[in-house]
Every structure is written in C-alpha cells, then in structure tokens.
Image (tube, rainbow, N blue to C red):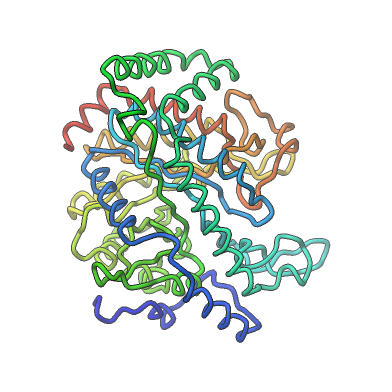
Amino acid sequence: MKSQWSPNSWRSKPAKHLPIYKDKNLLKSSLDKIKKFPPLVFAGEARSLKSKLADVSNGKAFLLQGGDCAESFADFHPDNIKNSFKVILQMAVVLTFGASCPIVKVGRIAGQFAKPRSSDEEIINGVELESYKGDIINGIDFTEIERVPNPLRLIQAYNQSASTLNLLRAFSQGGYANLNQVHQWNLNFIEGENANKFSKIADRIDECLGFMKACGINDNNARQINETEFFTSHEALLLEYEEALTRIDSTSGKWYDVSAHMLWVGDRTRQLDGAHIEFVRGIENPIGIKVGPSTNEDELVKILDFINPENEAGKITLICRMGADKIESHLPKIVQKIMFEGKKVVWACDPMHGNTIKSNTGYKTRPVNNIFSEIQKFFAIHRSLGSYPGGIHLEMTGSDVTECMGGLQQITDEDLKNRYHTFCDPRLNASQSLEIAFLISEYLKDDKFLSLKSSQI
C-alpha cells in the first residue's frame, strides 16, 4: 500500500474543505516557489517527537498541545509569540510536577492558518460571500476581494511560519525557558490572580527547585534547567501547501512533511477514502486524528490500520473532542475497541470544540467549567478502563482576551465584548490556561492516577 503513495496521490481522492482557486497559474507559481523553499522543520526533529510520543503512549510522559485556534497575519508580532510560548512553559512546569513525568510540549503554531468551516458561504445583510477559511486562504474582511482565495497567501503563511519558528528556537534554547524564571512567573500568577488555592503546589515546586540547587544542579551545569524542547503542529487541511512542503529525508529515505513536526486530521476530514487520510498515510511525521461523537470505532480502527500498519508507538495521537455532556456516552466504547485491537496510541483530550456555546449576548464562547469537566471525565473514563490518559489539546493564547467565560477572572457574558479578538473560535486566555494546568496538576497527583501511570511503565 505504501508503494502506491506519493505526495500528490491525495488528488485522486474525494477532498473536503479545500478552497477553489480561480487563478490556477498564480496557484502553480506560488506552489512551485514553496517547493524550492527550505524546510521549516527537520526530519530528525519529527523523529524525536515521535520517540517522545511513544513514551507518552507507554505512560512515561504527558502531552501538552496548545495554541491559537487560527493564526493570523494581522496579529503576527514577536510579543504574541513570546506570550503564547511563555504560558505553555508555565503550564508545563505545573504539569510536570502533577504528572511526575516529562511533559512533551507541542504548539499549535507556525502553520495553524487554515480552518474548515461548516458552510462554504457566509451571508451578511443579504450579501453572500465565501466563508473566511483562514489567512492562508482568504481574508477575514467581508468584501468580495478579500474573500476570494488568494494563492499569494500561501507564501506569506510560509514566511510567517519561518519567522515564528526562528523566534521559538531562540526562546527555547537561549535561556528564556529557564526553569527558575518560569516558576517565578507562576508565583506571580498566583499572587496576581489571588489564586491562593494553588499555592500549595507552587510551594512544593519551590521546595523541589531548592533541593536541586542544594545538590548543585543549576543553570550553569544542567542544560535542562536553561533550555527546553518545543515542537510545532497544525491541521493538515490545505493539502496543496502540505504537498509542496513534503520532502524525502536524505538520512532515512522516507517522506516527511517539513511544514511542522506533527500534523493532525480534523473531525470533518478524516474519511477513510478521503484525500486527507490518503495524504497523511504516506508521511513519517507523528499524526493526530480528531475523534468526535460521530466517530465510528470500527472505521477508526481501519483508519489506524491504513495510516499506521506497523502499529508504531508514537505515530498516532487520538485527540478526543466530545463535549462534557457527551464524552461519557461516546468515549468508553472507542477506548475499549482500540484497546481490544491492541493499537498503540496516545490518548489526548481536546475539551474545547465540544463545549462551544452561543452566549446570551451573541458571542461564541466556551465556559471554563465545562472545559475542565470534560477533562475530569476524560481521566475518569481512562482510569476505569485501565488505559492511560496521555495529554490535553487546548485552543489558547498568551494574551489577556475575554473569549471563554469563567475562570479565576470570573469573565461573564457581559465581559466577552471587552477583548473578543479571535478570528475563529474562542480561546482560553493566559490566566485561564494556567488555571486549567493547576487544576489538572491537582488531579494528576491523585494516587489512583499515579498508580495507573506506574502500571503502564
């Protein structure tokens, strides 16, 4: 089956949620340029991530995947990149303590530009135009010119991704990720948000750092104190772009999509006979599969057989997005089926997409209570079935937006309008993201979870 694959074999399959470009010549010239551009990531880095995800699937690590719903050209600024990276670092420190294992940090960043939409068209005041599908495809302004898919945006997205990755590499290796500094940020969060209920966790982390320092482990002699590994991911939606960045690795002779370390296929595009599954089956990158309430467990097994015929650990992450009110009726049978078939996967919880509601003031939002409720139920289900809940997948930002209701800041329906900046779906702000990390850390410290984790090792 693999021998029949090529980077463009997806073109022979039914493809959903792909734009129709009117200027075919401009599309071809744009893609031809991208094919000659340098890789954004390296195959060896993708292999490293796969190895770490294999540890997650074996209960030896925990996955933290998070970032913007959809990156935009307008919000591209080093401060925004820094703030998002900062909050992921803060969350990782808290989760490391709670899970008592390494945290694999993966950002929805440096390529998360395209979004599938429920409708191809949008109507405002009787005017019908193509829906906004992400900055890599068209513009958000409701004008005919902006809404026409523009191939030049492919090149702009590549350039922004390259700049973002350059900054992320500098932050992760240049001292910004210093463990002591990140812990101090968390202490500032607890004080600033009046989050005294999390002070016990912070105090215990403080004790651990003090013990390490007393033993002579510091940023002068331990690289792990001063640096961190950070990987990138996005949805493999715009297949023309992904194809242009799919290259043969000179070391292994295998195909890698060098647009990101990890790609995932969304809930709307994971058809077994579809173009998106066809594309990802041929690349060696770690692959995520979104799993929603409509997922048929038998078809999911067929998808896993198709994408990962050798049942390689670390290759597949099942990103479950059910909703707090549906997860208990849908997830158990899927977990049981995958366990029965002996499939090696990472189980991750996406508590965002299934908990989207429309507020009384007309904003699309997500209540923090519902988000954490789904996370709790996700862990409880896996604990009851003897499987390992290996990670979380969040739409979040390092900015102080008001898009999700609740949290320590007690954001209300009326507050949403204050800083509702998302181009697509509502995101957790920095405070809410860190609050979720502390809540999960408390839950992970539960003896039942730790004993379950130990049984997987």
| Label tally | 0
Residue furthest to the front in view is 220
* Percent x, y of residue 392: 40, 41
* Percent x, y of residue 242: 46, 69
Q: Look at the picture and state if 367 lies above or below 144.
A: above
Q: Is residue 428 left or right of residue 92?
A: right
Q: Please identify the quarter of the rendering in which residue 348 is found.
A: top left
Q: Look at the picture and state if 313 lies above or below 120.
A: above
Q: Please identify the quarter of the rendering in which residue 263 is found.
A: bottom left
Q: Is residue 364 left or right of residue 330?
A: right
Q: Look at the picture and state if 432 lies above or below 159.
A: above
* Percent x, y of residue 335: 28, 47
Q: Is residue 340 left or right of residue 269?
A: left
Quadrant where the N terminus lies? Answer: bottom left
Which residue is located at x 30 percent, y 55 percent? 316
Q: Nearer the viewer, residue 209 or 150?
A: 209
* Percent x, y of residue 453: 22, 33
Quadrant where the C terminus lies? Answer: top left
Q: Nearer the viewer, residue 431 or 301?
A: 431
Q: Is residue 100 left or right of residue 265?
A: left
Which residue is located at x 28 percent, y 20 percent? 216
Q: Please identify the quarter of the rendering in which residue 201 is found.
A: top left
Which residue is located at x 69 percent, y 54 percent? 74
Q: Look at the picture and state if 10 lies above or below 269.
A: below
Residue furthest to the bottom in view is 25
